Image (cartoon, rainbow, N blue to C red):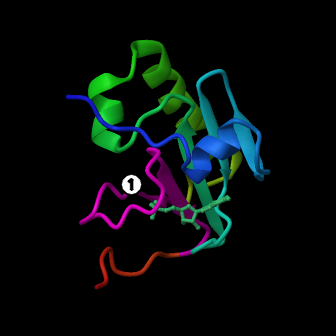
Amino acid sequence: MTYAYDDTNIFAMILRGEIPNSTVVETDHSLAFRDIHPQAPVHILLIPKGKYVTIDDFAANAGPEEAADFWATFASVIESEGLREKGFRVISNAGEHGLQEVPHFHLHILGGHAMGPILAR
Ligand code: AMP
């Protein structure tokens, strides 16, 4: 399955260095940075540098090095932000029904206080 990637999306611009970001950690294949409109005391976005549109695109098409790097970076963010002890929430919005705004796969990593109900409409 191929996914149409839009090079004009804002995370692509961040990855090209065209707009600034508040970097938490950067590796060869991944970037974690702070969400510009935080929804919790800790709100970090973790993205692969590769051109993946959604989480299922990444799951189906990322290479083993990219995938391993992504999950290692995820673990290092949880560690460095001190989220392991009290816990956290991870969200990945995909497509129209997921209300995904930025069409570059990202995990929202949320923590720092107890989360509310998992869904609201
Ligand atoms: P989503 O609806 O899952 O696509 O969420 C996109 C997220 O990207 C939102 O939480 C925005 O606040 C965040 N966002 C948009 N532009 C930026 C930016 N330039 N830097 C950091 N976060 C951003």
Question: What x and y, as percent, mark residue 7?
Answer: 53, 40
Q: Is residue 104 magenta?
A: yes
Image location of residue 59, percent across then percent down: 30, 31
Q: Main secondary structure of the magenta part?
A: loop
* 116 up-or-down from 33: above or below: below
Q: Is residue 21 magenta?
A: no
Q: Residue at x 62, y 68 (%)?
A: 112
Question: Taking the image as drawn, is residue 91 in sight?
Answer: yes
Per the image, label 1 sits on a secondary structure element best described as loop
Q: Is residue 78 visible?
A: no
Which of the 4 image quarters holds residue 100? bottom left
Give the magenta-colored segment's residue range. Answer: 87-113
Q: Assess mark 1: CB under 8 A from ligand 1?
A: yes
Nearest the camera: 33 or 112?
A: 33
- The x, y position of residue 22, in whole percent, is 77, 53
Question: In screen coordinates, is 69 left or right of 32?
Answer: left
Check disc 1: other Cα within 10 Å, few if <14, some if 14-19, many if 20+.
some
Residue pointed to by mark 1: 92
Who is closer to the viewer here, 72 or 79?
72
Please tell me in which quadrant of the rendered image residue 85 appears.
Answer: bottom right
Give x and y (percent) for residue 17: 76, 39
The amino acid on which the numbered mark 1 sits, given as a three-letter code, is Ser
Q: In the rendered view of the protein, which quadrant contains the C terminus?
A: bottom left
Q: Is residue 76 left or right of residue 63?
A: right
